[in-house]
Image: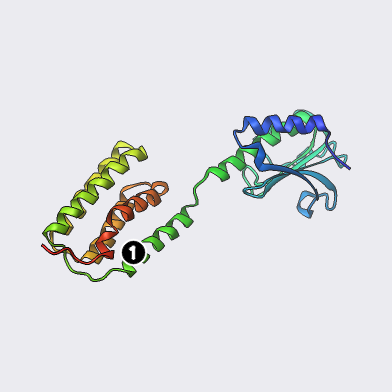
């Protein structure tokens, strides 16, 4: 049996749309409340964000007067009632719970939960990006034919590749200090190529310098650009003069 009515679900939809999350990413299901809610085994109308599996549960176990069990400090509980809202993730903890409130406070709790979902959904997975960078660089170097230094024709091609990186990086909307650091890194790796550094060693140096020059959330894009512009360094035979 449903806990909340059709019009109340419509109220929740209005909050979803205001959050700038895609309403099509949400689905209503019925779930049993887990033990951590304090009401184990109740049937709860549950809104699930499918891409993240985060969810918010709505049920009414006659919780009037139990607002002290809530753990969402951002929410001022001004309207006591029977509703409980339990959701993941919480605002300051893994799980959030708003207890003994009327429907207007329920909707305020929903808005806070949606903000948490959007925060987590929008956040880049920097650990996954670092692993992706490691694989890209490793794959390129693994297929390198040798570690010979660059010849004159290859040095000109290196300069063209670094110019391509410089141009592509301008589209990343880096801050002035970040762009200045990237420019210094490009000059450094150009000079390293001219010092007869081995091509494998140079490619690893260039990858490390470019990742150092930009914020972590931009590093994966820089590596993609660099692999596109410079993978010939370790995947082709040396160009003869």
> Is there any visible trace of residue 178 in the rendered image?
no
User: Residue 158 or 54: which is nearer the viewer?
Assistant: 158
Q: Report the side of 107 relative to 215 (left or right).
A: right
Query: Residue shown at 78%/53% (left/top)?
Result: 34
Q: Is residue 180 above or below residue 20?
A: below
Q: Secondary structure at mark 1?
A: helix
Q: Identify the residue at the far front of this view.
A: 240
Residue 104 is situated, as x and y percent measured from the top left of the image, at 76, 28
Q: How many marks?
A: 1
User: Residue 9 or 108: which is nearer the viewer?
Assistant: 9
Query: Residue shown at 53%/43% (left/top)?
Result: 122
Classify the position of the C terminus by image quarter: bottom left
- Characterize the local packing of mark 1: few (<14), some (14-19) or many (20 or more) Cα atoms within 10 angstroms: some
Residue 142 is situated, as x and y percent measured from the top left of the image, at 33, 69
Chosen colour scheme: rainbow
Residue 36 is situated, as x and y percent measured from the top left of the image, at 76, 52
Residue 114 is situated, as x and y percent measured from the top left of the image, at 64, 38
Q: Report the side of 117 relative to 160 (left or right).
A: right
User: Residue 102 or 162: which is nearer the viewer?
Assistant: 162
> Is there any visible trace of residue 108 in the rendered image?
yes
Quarter of the image where one finds residue 108: top right
Classify the position of the N terminus by image quarter: top right
Q: Is residue 196 above or below residue 68?
A: below
Query: Residue shown at 26%/46% (left/top)?
Result: 164
Pointer 1 residue: 140
Query: Residue shown at 29%/52% (left/top)?
Result: 229
Q: Report the side of 196 relative to 107 (left or right).
A: left
């Amino acid at each position: 049996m449903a806990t909340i009515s059709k019009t109340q679900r419509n109220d929740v939809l209005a909050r979803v749309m205001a959050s700038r999350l895609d309403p099509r990413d949400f689905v209503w299901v019925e779930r049993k409340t887990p033990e951590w809610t304090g009401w184990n085994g109740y049937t709860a109308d549950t809104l699930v964000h499918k891409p993240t599996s985060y969810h918010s549960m709505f049920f009414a176990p006659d919780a009037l007067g139990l607002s002290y069990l809530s753990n969402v400090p951002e929410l001022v509980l001004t309207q006591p009632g029977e509703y409980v809202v339990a959701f993941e993730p919480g605002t300051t903890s893994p799980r959030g719970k708003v207890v003994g409130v009327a429907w207007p406070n329920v909707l305020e709790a929903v808005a806070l939960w949606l903000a948490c979902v959007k925060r987590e959904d929008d956040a880049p997975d920097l650990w996954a990006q670092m692993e992706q960078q490691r694989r890209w660089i490793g794959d390129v170097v693994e297929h390198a034919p040798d570690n010979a230094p660059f010849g004159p024709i290859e040095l000109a091609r290196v300069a063209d590749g670094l110019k391509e990186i410089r141009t592509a990086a301008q589209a990343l909307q880096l801050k002035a200090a970040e762009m200045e650091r990237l420019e210094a890194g490009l000059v450094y790796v150009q000079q390293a190529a001219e010092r007869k550094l081995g091509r494998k060693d140079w490619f690893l140096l260039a990858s490390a310098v470019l990742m150092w020059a930009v914020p972590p959330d931009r590093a994966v894009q820089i590596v993609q650009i660099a692999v596109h512009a410079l993978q010939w360094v370790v995947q082709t035979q040396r160009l003869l003069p």
